[in-house]
Amino acid sequence: MSFTCIIMGAAGRDFHDYLRFFRDRPEFTVVCFTAHQIPFIEERSFPAELAGPNHAGDIPIYSEARLSELIREHRVDFVFLSYSDLPHEDVMHRASIVQAAGASFALLGPGHTELSSTLPVLSVTASRTGAGKSPLCLALAEHFRTTGTRVGVIRHPMPYGDLRRQEVQRFATHEDLDTHECTVEEREEYEPYVDRGLVIYAGVDYAKILAAAESESEAILWDGGNNDASFIRAGLSITVLDALRAGHELRYYPGETNFRRADVLVLNKVRSAKASDVDILRENVRAHNPAATVIEADLDVAVPDPSAIAGKRVLVVDDGPTLTHGGMSYGAGGVAAERYGAAEIIDPRAHAIGTIAEAFTNYPHLGPVLPALGYSEKQREELAETIRRAAPDVVVDGSPAGLRRLLDLDVPVVEVQYRFVQLAGPSMFELVDTFLATH
């Protein structure tokens, strides 16, 4: 018996699920991927070189808007959802669309998709995009270096370019970022490691990526993307919950999976949140994962020179995914502008052009901050032109991408720094050290 399938994705989990589950199972024929969330992804195809011997050519990628049409055209048996940060209600809307078109709807679980490592593995995941995974991962990676442990950091995929060239990526220098033609969104995740002299891996084929990291490491650290689950089976699973979005840990897919599976739960941004919202997190932990170790933390937001913001007309640029499908109206840049006394935070909506203007239409929840969108050269040019038209005294850059190096701007840029700060609970670093000592 054979089954015709479509994989619904967003250029990450979908490719991993294909390689782990479908590639070597000839009874499943994947006729196409559909794409959502990430601009321009559907303009590519999944290469035949990666697709394996059961596919004669590239696998096309289409817009998810065509899903019903594609199901009928190819007489599809199963549609597999393979991307993250969706409200549970939206997951079921997609299931209903699939079933209305005549196919069955499916989700692959960890047993069919996780890789196993020969080394101790720590994973950092989250309940939502923008919960604070990256500062925690950076803190852990620097702790490993301090203790003399060679750690291989593996990042959730962001292969937005030529998939043939992105099968295995190793970033150790800024030249590596240029060689791989990284987008703004990729740089936001990779550059903070490179800036600290740390190596980070990513790409498309995570079996090969894991093998490359294992070859020069003593432990593996999974740095998750969005609220997706880890691609590698972890001996110590850490999930970050966002106190500014209390309750989302039970309302988003697959963030709730991460929440329920975690060995350690980090209640983050607790100083910035209402006490009642922190109480909601604590109660949900007691009700749904009482065996987890609980840590409370926040993000320390700072800039090198606060006087560069004080009294100025500023344009705030914050992390793109956190603001768009992450649902936040502001990020670290917005916090810094308020904290350090900006005279005015310029609303970029009146100055936005092209796809940047479209983003404000598509995500009406956005506040007076500019999402750092740069999935293509054209979009980076539109981002730079939007900044020029706003004519700020200074740009407050809350994205980790380093906009001053990426965009041709004639205005001062203040880069916001933020780091993980533990406030309560057992020491995160002692928990990690104990885990490594026993594995």
Image: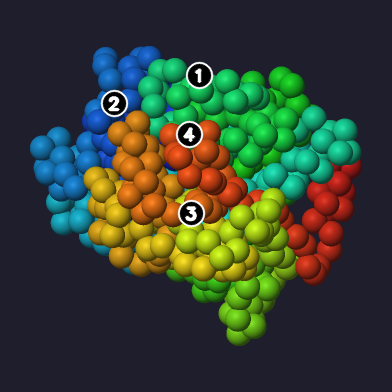
Residue found 38% across the figure and 14% down from its top: 49
Structural distance between the alpha carbons of marks 2 and 1: 21 Å
Q: Which mark is residue 406?
A: 4
Which structural element holds mark 3?
Answer: loop
Q: Which mark is residue 179?
A: 1
Structural distance between the alpha carbons of marks 1 and 4: 14 Å
Residue found 56% across the figure and 65% down from its top: 311
In the image shown, does 216 or 320 lie closer to the viewer?
320
In the image shown, does 399 or 269 lie closer to the viewer?
399
Residue found 54% across the figure and 26% down from its top: 177
In percent of width and height, residue 416 lies at 61, 52
The crowding category of the residue bearing disc 3, from other C-alpha atoms within 10 Å (few below 14, some 14 to 19, many at least 20), is some
Q: Is residue 399 above or below residue 22?
A: below
Hey, what amino acid is under mark 2?
Answer: Ser
In percent of width and height, residue 127 lies at 54, 60
**Is residue 214 in view from this perspective?**
yes
* Disc nearest the viewer among 2 and 4: 4
Q: Earlier in the sequence, mark 3 or mark 1?
A: 1
Which structural element holds mark 4?
Answer: helix
Which structural element holds mark 2?
Answer: strand
Hey, what amino acid is under mark 4?
Answer: Leu
Residue located beneath label 3 in the image: 393
Residue located beneath label 2 in the image: 45
In the image, 218: left or right of 321? right
Q: Earlier in the sequence, mark 3 or mark 2?
A: 2
Q: Earlier in the sequence, mark 2 or mark 4?
A: 2
Hey, what amino acid is under mark 3?
Answer: Asp
* Disc nearest the viewer among 1 and 4: 4
Query: Looking at the image, do the residues carrying marks 3 and 1 touch, with CB atoms under 8 Å apart?
Result: no
Which structural element holds mark 1?
Answer: helix
Query: Looking at the image, do the residues carrying marks 2 and 4 touch, with CB atoms under 8 Å apart?
Result: no
Q: Is residue 133 above or below residue 171?
A: below
